[in-house]
Amino acid sequence: MNIKEKIEASIEVKKRILNDDAFVENIAKAAEFCVEALRNGGKIWFCGNGGSAADAQHLAAELTGRFYKERRPLPAEALHVNSSYITAVANDYGYDQTYARLVRGSGRKGDVLVAISTSGNSVNILNAIGEAKLLEMPVIGMTGETGGRMEHLCKVLLNVPSHDTPRIQEAHIMIGHIICEQIENTLFP
């Protein structure tokens, strides 16, 4: 596949999202859950593996730093950023528990978990979702087309219409940016 074909493939995934009114409405719902949490003193937690971890950290930074507007920082954090914690828990309890233990230890009712997994089947993400649900935290899932095992576990599922990991991740960051902008515009009109 040549470069132009790759760009066209990325555009096609985004066009499918654009033309899916239910998907667009789910993006709005995800932003609304985040706004509600932040208005009520909650925090937005993000988690993912590999490229999805990079996306999680990127989106948390958009909220704690700034997106478009000069404003106060918003409480948001990517669960993987403490390497000492991650390596200790992975060593002592197994990698599958890394995010779950942090949600259990630091999350609370009123927070939101944004769980990012292109397959929707990452066990450490599923375990974090389980802990979030026990704490009655809404979960926003960002996955690929099928939703994987996350499909029925999330309050809002943003399942990008693709099976191609790079195209899914490109759409995830677009969706994440839209959510951050919606949050910022709502809280800081």
Image: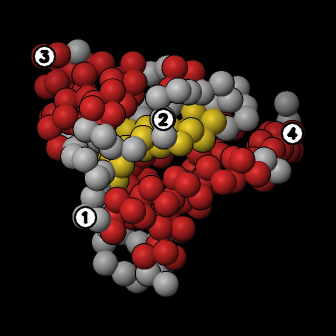
Do the residues under discs 4 and 2 have CB atoms within 8 angstroms? Answer: no
Q: Nearer the viewer, mark 1 or mark 4?
A: 1
Image check: 158 left or right of 100? right
Image check: 186 left or right of 94? right
Where does label 1 land, which residue? 41
Image height of 114 relative to 145, above or below: below
Image height of 108 relative to 36, above or below: above
- Which amino acid does the dot numbered 3 rest on? Asp
Distance between the Cα atoms at labels 4 and 2?
Answer: 33 Å
Q: Earlier in the sequence, mark 2 or mark 1?
A: 1
Where does label 3 land, which residue? 92
Q: Residue at x 42, y 64 (%)?
A: 35
Where is residue 76 shown, x and y percent of the image?
A: 32, 57
- Which amino acid does the dot numbered 1 rest on? Gly
Distance between the Cα atoms at labels 1 and 4?
Answer: 45 Å
Where does label 4 land, which residue? 5
Do the residues under discs 1 and 4 have CB atoms within 8 angstroms? Answer: no
Q: Earlier in the sequence, mark 4 or mark 3?
A: 4
- The colour mode here is secondary structure
Where does label 2 land, which residue? 154
